[in-house]
Amino acid sequence: MRIFLAFPFTKLLTEDNIFDENMKDFLVNTINALTNKGHSVFSAQLREEFGDKLMTPDVATNLDHMEMCKADLVVAFPGWKPISGGVHVELGWASSMKKPIIAFLHDDQEYTPMITGLHKVTNVEYVHFNDKSINELTSMVVDNVVIFTNRAIRVS
């Protein structure tokens, strides 16, 4: 399965384009875990080497959109401290293409109705997490992708 991993990027970069180390570890672990399960995972952070090889907006936006077109599933983190405008745009693309989405929402964050109502436009599974479950977040992603994949296989 081709997975588009929508995750905050520029808001997690320092002035020197250094990506938040904890978030980098989470993404690398999650991508590796999904890849080990046989999935292909697109991550803009990985493509742009977590800020070491940033692309121009014109190039990155076009490439991200092309990846969204090829995706079978979107795993999205709309952000929490800070909210990600880029992920919100990607969710707009995904919903307009009727892509299934697993949206991870932090319990302490208030999300726009455009996120919480997205299930009225396309197939969205909302997964809630909090600071206590951060260490289990990679497992939560993998478990939910497995559940989605098993459901998709049964429907086929």
Image (cartoon, rainbow, N blue to C red):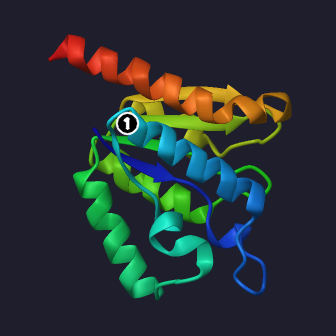
Q: Residue at x 33, y 40 (%)?
A: 39
Other-residue count near label 1 (Cα within 10 Å), few / some / many at <14 / 14–19 / ≥20: some
Q: Quadrant of the N terminus?
A: top left
Judge from the rendering whether residue 137 lies leftward or rightward of residue 110; answer left or right: left
How far from the left and from the top, in percent, is residue 80? 75, 49
The one of 10 and 142 positioned closer to us in this rendering: 142
What is the number of callouts on the image? 1
- Point out the residue furthest to the left here: 156
Q: Amino acid at mark 1?
A: Val
Residue 99 in sight: yes
Q: Is residue 2 above or below residue 151?
A: below
Q: Would you name the residue on which mark 1 appears?
A: 121
- Point out the residue furthest to the front here: 36
Q: Residue at x 72, y 77 (%)?
A: 18
Q: Residue at x 48, y 61 (%)?
A: 89
Report helix, strand or loop for mark 1.
loop
Q: Residue at x 42, y 54 (%)?
A: 92
Q: Is residue 33 above or below residue 69?
A: above
Judge from the rendering whether residue 81 lies leftward or rightward of residue 63; answer left or right: right
Residue 77 in sight: no
How far from the left and from the top, in percent, is residue 7? 57, 55
Q: Quadrant of the C terminus?
A: top left
How far from the left and from the top, in percent, is residue 30? 55, 43
- Point out the residue furthest to the top here: 154
